[in-house]
Amino acid sequence: MKVWWLRPLVRLLAALVLPFAVPAIITALIWALPGDPAEIICPPERCGGTEVLAARWNLDQGPWHFYVNWLSSAMQGDFGNSWRVLQGVTVRSLLEESVPTTTLLMALGMLPIVLGSIGAATGRLPARVDPALSAFGVVPAVIFSLFFAALIELRYGAESFDEHARMVRLGVGAVVLGLSDGALGAAVAGVRALFSAEEKQRYVGVAVLRGEGVLANMLPNVSPALAGQLRARLVHLLSGTVVVEVVLRIDGVGDLLWQGTLLQDFGVVLAAAGGFAFFSAFMLFFQAVVEILVSLHVRRAPVLPLAPG
Amino acid sequence: MSRALSLVVASACFFGLVGAGLLAPDHLSAGSMEVAYKGPAEVFPFGTDARGRPLTEYAQQGARVIVLPALVAGAAVAFAAVLGGLLRCVGSARVDSVIQAFSELVGSLPRMVVILVVALLIPSTWRSLLPLGLAWAVLGSPGAMDEAAAVAERLGGARFVEALKAHGFSWSRIYLYHIVALNLRPVVVRQASETIVQVTFLEISLSYLSAQKNQSSFTHPDNIQSWAALLADGYRSLVTSQPSGHALVLGLVLVGLVTLMARGFTVAARAR
């Protein structure tokens, strides 16, 4: 890259485009498929009065009409009603019920990743554990979840949904999210590689000679890369919530999205996918802002004291 | 593990997988209730299910579901990695910006969400893992392109190409042999292998989740059984007294073999 601002600018633009692009792509795909969109969404053998439904869902006047209507309603917090998952119930209320659960699950799932990353950055977590973490991460989320689901079922019963069992499911889900599919292993290896590469820079050696802290000197310079890793990990966890929530029977957005997909509820899927895209865009925006701030800070000319006389 | 041994192990797993897929029956056999839930010792080699059907057929049909889509997805990611590495050698800032924009947009999408959207849009008559595998490959390609580009960058990028040109090497020798075969090979093979494993896990996950909600899978027609069926059947042995633990073991072994295959190819292709 010739200019420092090009990379964060591209990132900012991508962050702005993403929340609009995902619903647009879904809309385009609905119309790109052979056949009438209304019939794809609700096949005549399953739904009666396709024309009436098409008019109600804004499917009768082309993709642009559908997209603009959905987007303008979504911007006001109106995602319409669920078409099949819970017919007639607003998608907004379904999301309001499931988003806090998924947020808590992801926050708990991030705990081992954050702790592992801090351990790798400070050297408290020795490098010899990396192969073990990597081997542990080979196990896919579905298999991890399956075994934990069996344990919960044996301990609390299959239909245990009281507060205690719910918290156990959430805790176990967080462990699965944080450890499986290489989440922890990749985070630790990534942070360790980043810091060990930065440690070889000359300024770090100079900082040591001046008696300054190594980590405090490196941290500002590696923060854009750390922000990138944080984003990658969060997007990874977001993907993993679908499997974990369905297998462990946690009522979150991932489970809602899966139900919407199985039952072909486009109202729910569009809203959930839009929500996921918005979150992803926010993380992209955050990374770009960190990059810009660090670049501006690095390029700031120091104010030198005037020479006496 | 040595490269040669890794290659032998990986190849054995690969040909076993392909062979099982090719020999898979279109429908499970009728079976016999008299041999229901027999273990491998009683009905060789893998035992039977609740209706006395051999689990060998499950293993074969599961292999058939994943072989082609996983290989196509792996090849697509390998192609993307090669492209990413070669484009970095062009040394154009504009090309780099375009690739970054593509990577930022595609890499920001939560993969499972995109997969579910694609699954949602596939008509029920087209049920196959192939479109989902290809979507997974597209989503995984930015990472592969980035990594290959970083390797090409460390190699010297455009300066490396100029140096070899100055030595009078042909373009095919520079790009295909020196850059792709000698330098990008470890990254390309690893990315492709990982994609094969990920597509396999994706299939198992989607089929298992569908089975849990008593719905048809997005990845295969109803007459075909996925390896997820083995896991789902075996799971019941953990929570009930159903004697289907051998199905769970077989499912886990099959998943392990695919992982071993990917690991073997990765080790065999690592840089000298």
Image (cartoon, coloured by chain):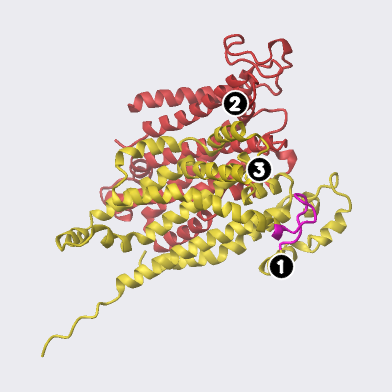
Q: Amino acid at mark 3?
A: Phe
Between residue B145 and residue B143, name the one nearer to us. Answer: B143
Outermost residue on the bottom side: it is A309
What residue sits right under mark 3 in the picture? A161
What residue sits right under mark 1 in the picture? A73
Crowding near pointer 2: few (<14 within 10 Å), some, many (20+)? many
Which tint is chain A? yellow
User: In this rendering, would A115 be left or right of B201?
Assistant: left
Question: In the rendered image of this protein, does residue B153 appear above or below residue A142?
Answer: below
Picture coordinates of residue B159, whole percent (x, y): 29, 55
Query: Which residue is pictured at 41% across the width and 23% down the height?
Result: B8
Residue interval drawn in magenta = A79-93
Say whether marks 2 and 1 touch (CB < 8 Å): no
The answer to which image quadrant residue A186 occupies is top left
Looking at the image, can residue B160 be seen? no
Which tint is chain B? red
Q: Which label lies toward us, 3 or 2? A: 3
Mark 1 or mark 3: which comes first in sequence? 1
